[in-house]
Amino acid sequence: MDTARDLLRAQLNNCIAQHQSLVENLRDHAEQADDPRYRQLCQQYLPHLERHQGMIEEFGRTVGAEGGGGIKGALGAVLGKARDAVDAMRETDFLRVVGDIVTIRQAQDTFATFARAGERLGEQRLAELGRMGEQEHDQMQRQFNAYCAELFVDHVQGTVPQKDDRARTGTTTGQTTY
């Protein structure tokens, strides 16, 4: 790193790529999920995550971050394909949601760092983005953790929704018709 601004740009580029991966995970999982509760949870947070993504990218442009373009964009596309392959192997909502929780936590930690660093550096916009992202990702993590616990119990009790339940209930967009 040549300067502190280079570090800031690099961290914003990492955050943009990391957060975009979370957005794409939830988009995919909203479609792939067998359990309507999981589909609804993903759909509930997608607008918030998409808004965060836009704000991160906008702030990144103000400090000269690439926003995931160039080599990072190509790497992100490759990592996205790898994520799709891993998701294909994760045939249960339980394994998908556990992966989502890990990604949510990474984003939450990144935003917490931005909040503290922005305050100390006098970068008010970075601090604001960090605080907002940390709070909203914290709430999201709590809800995903609660759902994960419910799903764990469902698995143990043998009441977890199966792939063929979607066909029986006619649900494909998160709307249940029970």
Image (spheres, rainbow, N blue to C red):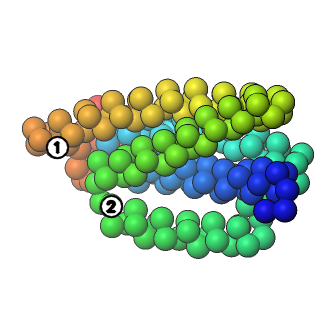
For label 2, the residue is 90
| Label 1 crowd (10 A; few <14 / some 14-19 / many >=20) | few
Tell me residue 10's x, y (percent): 74, 57
Q: For mark 1, what is the residue?
A: 155
Residue 79: x, y in percent?
A: 55, 68
Where disc 1 sits, the SS reads helix
Residue 148: tell me if it is visible. yes
Disc 2, disc 1: CB below 8 Å?
Answer: no
Quarter containing the N terminus = bottom right
- Residue kind at label 2, given as amino acid type: Arg
| Quadrant position of residue 118 | top right
Observer able to see residue 20: no
Q: Rounded to the nearest whole Å, what is the CA distance between mark 2 and mark 1? A: 15 Å
Q: Nearer the viewer, residue 22 or 47?
A: 22
The mark found on residue 169 in the picture is: none
Relative to 106, residue 76 above or below: below
Outermost left residue: 157
The quadrant of the picture occupied by the C terminus is: top left
Q: Measured from the top left, where is residue 160 in percent x and y?
A: 20, 42
- Using the image as rendered, state which of residue 28 and residue 140 is in the foreground: 140
Which mark sits nearer the N-terminus, 2 or 1? 2
Residue shown at 47% from the left, 66% from the top = 84
Q: Is residue 2 left or right of residue 49?
A: right
Where, by quadrant of the figure, is residue 176 drawn? top left
Q: Residue at x 89, y 46 (%)?
A: 62
Q: Residue at x 18, y 38 (%)?
A: 154
Residue 82: image location, x then y, percent = 49, 71
Crowd class of label 2 (few under 14; some 14 to 19; many from 20; radius 10 Å): some
Q: Residue at x 82, y 51 (%)?
A: 4
